[in-house]
Every structure is written in C-alpha cells, then in structure tokens.
Image (cartoon, rainbow, N blue to C red):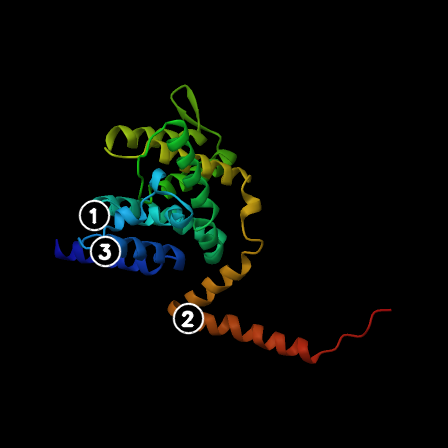
C-alpha cells in the first residue's frame, strides 16, 4: 500500500511539473485564492465573484477574477481536476501567450457579460457565480465541435446522437447531481466554446501564436531537456551568423 501511494504521488507530481506554463499558473493561482479565502479579515469571495448588481466600471475586474475563486476546498479541487487536462490541451495547441490573452480576454469576458445580461435584465435576478466550471464547459464546447467535425454522431443502439450535444448533456447532469451550480453560467460557457470552435471568435485571437510557442519550448528545454535546448538553439545561432555574413547577388 505505501508503494502504491508513493507511486501515485510521484505520477501526480510528474504530471503537475509537465503542465504548460499558463495552465500551471492558473492552478497555482486558484489554490492561492482558496488559501486566501480561509482567513476572515477580507471576504475574497465577495470581492471577486461575478455579481450582476455589483458590476460597475470600477468593478469590471470581476469578469476576470470570478473563475479563479471558489466556494470551498471541494469546489476548487473538482474544478482544478476537470480544468487542468482541458486547458493543457488548449495551451499546447495555441501557445502560452495566446492562451493568456484569450482566457483573460474574450473567452472569459464574453460568457461573463452574456451571463450578466441574461441574469440581470432578462431573469431579473442577482445570482453570484464563481469558479472555473465556466472555463471547463467552455473548453468542453470547443472539444465537442472539434469532435463533431471528425465524428459527427455517437451511436447508442439504433440512435444517432450528435457529438456536439455532449457538453449540454453534461450541463444537465451537473445541474441534477451537484447543488448550488449555475445552470445559466455553464450554458454561457458552452455557447462561447461552440462559437470559438466554429471559428466565429477567431478574429478576437492574437494574430501570431508562434512567439508563445517558442517561449514555451525554450522554457521546457531549459528546465527539462538542456541537451536538446543546446542542440536546437546552437544550429539556429550558427545559421543566423552565416546568413549575416553571406551577401546574396542582386537579382537582375
């Protein structure tokens, strides 16, 4: 039994250290906010939650802070466990800086503002939301569209179920089994994920993602694989110096 526990601990530690930079930073920040919420001097949940009636020009920071703050330990734990692999996959594809720009830009602002509009002006409510579950369902929406393009239907017996409906089914399951969840907030996340997966939000993405990918590669090489870093960088330096020394003849 001790050997099994040690093995699992080592695997978890190895996985956490191999997470991309942005994903790891989000996990650390969520844990830090949860620890900060243990004290009673400052109500961090009241400060950072997305509360429709509290959103003004001076409190617009709430549209970016609410996914990082959780109600309790289990709320933070389950959201982190669900978010980490999805965000890892997203960051690996789009790069660290692009992920940072998107998740502290349109991919958080759009569902947050849609939620505020629907909750405050349509439903006439003031339900506060917090937690990374909106990010989780957003990323599930992105993955569902990607899956639908290659595998449109899930066959269960004689029924053909569109694969893009999977996040909607999960929203219903979470709403039925877990109390105090935001059904509307999760739907806003899924809808934004659908729009991003379909390419309708592509114009909001940063124009270049190559730089962020290079930063991640350099960070990974210098921390995990120094020999590969030397092999990858030195030839590029040699080629750069060679190109600067060689003068091409003018074209006729």
The correct choice, above or below, for 22 with respect to 131 in the image is: below
User: What SS does tag 3 mark?
Assistant: helix
Task: Tell me how far mark 1 sits from mark 2, CA to CA.
Answer: 34 Å
Check the image and report above or below for 3 versus 159: below
Q: Residues under labels 1 and 3: Cα distance?
A: 12 Å
Where is residue 27? Give x, y as percent. 32, 54
Q: Nearer the viewer, residue 153 or 90?
A: 90
Q: CB of mark 1 within 8 Å of CB of mark 2?
A: no
Q: Are marks 2 and 3 in contact (CB under 8 Å)?
A: no
The percent coordinates of residue 102 (x first, y second) are 47, 50
Question: Which residue: 49% across, 52% down?
Answer: 94
Q: Which mark is residue 145?
A: none
For marks 2 and 3, the one nearer the N-term is 3
User: Where does the image place residue 231, in percent across and percent down from the top left?
Assistant: 50, 72
Name the residue that disc number 3 marks. Answer: 36
Q: Quadrant of the C terminus?
A: bottom right
Q: Mark 1 sits on what residue?
A: 73
Mark 1 or mark 3, earlier in chain: 3
Give the residue displayed 43% in from the left and 37% down from the top: 141
Q: Which callout, 1 or 2, points at the residue further toward the start of the chain?
A: 1
Horizontal relation, residue 92 to residue 74: left or right = right
Q: Tell me the number on the disc at residue 222.
A: 2
- Which quarter of the figure has residue 55? top left
């Amino acid at each position: 039994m001790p050997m099994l526990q040690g093995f699992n601990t080592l695997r978890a530690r190895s996985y956490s250290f191999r997470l991309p930079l942005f994903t790891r930073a989000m996990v650390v920040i969520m844990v830090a906010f949860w620890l900060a919420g243990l004290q009673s001097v400052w109500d961090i949940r009241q400060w950072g939650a997305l509360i429709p009636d509290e959103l003004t020009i001076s409190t617009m920071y709430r549209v970016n802070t609410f996914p990082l703050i959780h109600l309790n330990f289990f709320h933070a734990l389950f959201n982190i466990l669900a978010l980490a692999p999805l965000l890892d996959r997203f960051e690996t594809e789009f790069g660290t800086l692009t992920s940072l720009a998107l998740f502290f830009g349109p991919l958080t602002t759009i569902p947050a503002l849609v939620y505020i509009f629907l909750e405050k002006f349509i439903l006439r409510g003031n339900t506060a939301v917090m937690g990374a579950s909106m990010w989780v369902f957003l990323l599930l929406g992105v993955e569902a569209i990607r899956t639908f393009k290659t595998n449109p239907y899930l066959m269960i017996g004689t029924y053909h179920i569109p694969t893009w409906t999977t996040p909607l089914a999960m929203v219903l399951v979470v709403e039925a089994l877990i109390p105090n969840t935001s059904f509307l907030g999760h739907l806003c996340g899924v809808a934004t994920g659908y729009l991003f997966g379909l390419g309708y939000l592509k114009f909001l993405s940063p124009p270049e993602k190559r730089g962020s990918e290079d930063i991640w590669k350099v960070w990974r090489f210098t921390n995990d694989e120094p020999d590969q870093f030397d092999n990858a960088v030195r030839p590029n330096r040699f080629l750069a110096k060679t190109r600067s020394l060689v003068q091409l003849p003018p074209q006729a």
